[in-house]
């Protein structure tokens, strides 16, 4: 079963784009753990999510180490907001996607129990955010219209728990250089490429076995730093100056889906 990729990107066109003004960000590292009862379900093992600390459209960069190190970015494809009443206040990360018969729903929440720092007009400020988020991913696809595959598999139902931990190191780097959401995503993808990750072209690559440019249904992901054209069959790729966005001396935990230092089980 191919990774459940395409429905995630459909939502990008359903949400209003974030305004092109300076925002402040928080970066979370997510882990997906498949739950019992899933059938024909294959998904990314983790992700990095960039959220505006004051709420709004959030972006996600999925990662996997299955068959190689790959990432797939989807900008402004989730919502980050506060749910509250007189007794409780929680931050919520959510998304619903649909593409034909395939559907997926993401929901995770956590208490406002820590802060991140950012600079606004030369003044250092703090914003309340969750140190962690927990939730679920539910996915389904009715494939009855096309019949069973050669191995007899048909349809899909997937359940996965979501555990997210705030990455203060990535948050500080992103707030130091990213003005727009697009800039923030480039910081994350640029770091991933430094550690050998490359864009996942999705179904088109896995079905054909070819190293081709990203499929039209997947938002274009710009490569960072070094010349990586050889990874795409020699086809020309647009590069961005990720080196200038990420300080050389920055202390960053490699993106091996490990929890932040001092927290052994996010």
Image (tube, rainbow, N blue to C red):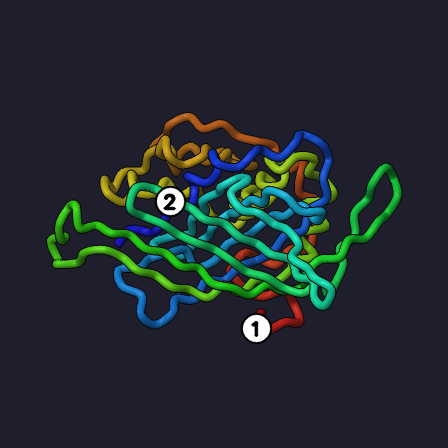
Position of the N terminus, as image quadrant, is bottom left
Residue topped by disc 1 = 265
Residue 21, percent from left and from top: 71, 31
Q: Residue at x 66, y 42 (%)?
A: 246
Q: Residue at x 37, y 27 (%)?
A: 235
Of the pair 126 and 81, the residue shown nearer to us: 81
Q: Quadrant of residue 252?
A: bottom right
Of the pair 79 and 89, the residue shown nearer to us: 89
Residue topped by disc 2 = 98
Question: In the picture provided, is 13 more to the left or to the right than 242?
Answer: left
Question: Can residue 249 be seen in the rendering of this structure?
Answer: no
Residue 229, percent from left and from top: 42, 32
- Mark 1: which secondary structure? loop
Q: Residue at x 38, y 64 (%)?
A: 159
Of the pair 185 and 132, the residue shown nearer to us: 132
Q: Is residue 10 above or below residue 143?
A: above
Residue 106, percent from left and from top: 47, 55
- Mark 2: which secondary structure? strand
Q: Is residue 184 above or below residue 29?
A: above
Mark 2 crowd level (few <14, some 14–19, many ≥20, 10 Å Cα): some
């Amino acid at each position: 079963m191919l990774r459940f990729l395409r429905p995630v990107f459909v939502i990008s066109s359903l949400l209003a784009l974030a305004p092109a003004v300076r925002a402040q960000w928080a970066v979370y590292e997510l882990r997906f753990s498949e739950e019992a009862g899933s059938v024909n379900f294959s998904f990314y093992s983790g992700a990095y999510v960039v959220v505006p600390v004051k709420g709004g459209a959030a972006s996600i960069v999925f990662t996997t180490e299955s068959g190689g190190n790959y990432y797939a970015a989807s900008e402004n494809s989730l919502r980050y907001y506060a749910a509250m009443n007189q007794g409780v206040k929680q931050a919520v990360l959510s998304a619903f996607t649909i593409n034909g018969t395939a559907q997926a729903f993401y929901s995770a929440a956590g208490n406002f129990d820590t802060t991140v720092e950012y600079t606004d007009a030369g003044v250092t400020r703090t914003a309340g955010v969750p140190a962690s988020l927990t939730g679920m991913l539910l996915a389904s696809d009715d494939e009855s219209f096309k019949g069973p595959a050669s191995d007899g598999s048909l349809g899909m139902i997937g359940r996965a728990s979501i555990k997210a931990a705030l990455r203060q190191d990535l948050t500080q780097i992103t707030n130091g250089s990213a003005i727009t959401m697009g800039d923030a995503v480039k910081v994350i993808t640029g770091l991933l490429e430094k550690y050998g990750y490359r864009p996942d072209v999705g179904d088109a690559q896995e079905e054909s076995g070819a190293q081709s440019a990203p499929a039209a249904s997947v938002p274009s992901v710009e490569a960072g730093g070094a010349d990586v054209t050889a990874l795409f069959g020699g086809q020309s790729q647009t590069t961005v100056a990720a080196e200038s966005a990420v300080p050389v001396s920055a202390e960053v935990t490699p993106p091996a889906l490990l929890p932040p230092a001092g927290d052994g089980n996010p």
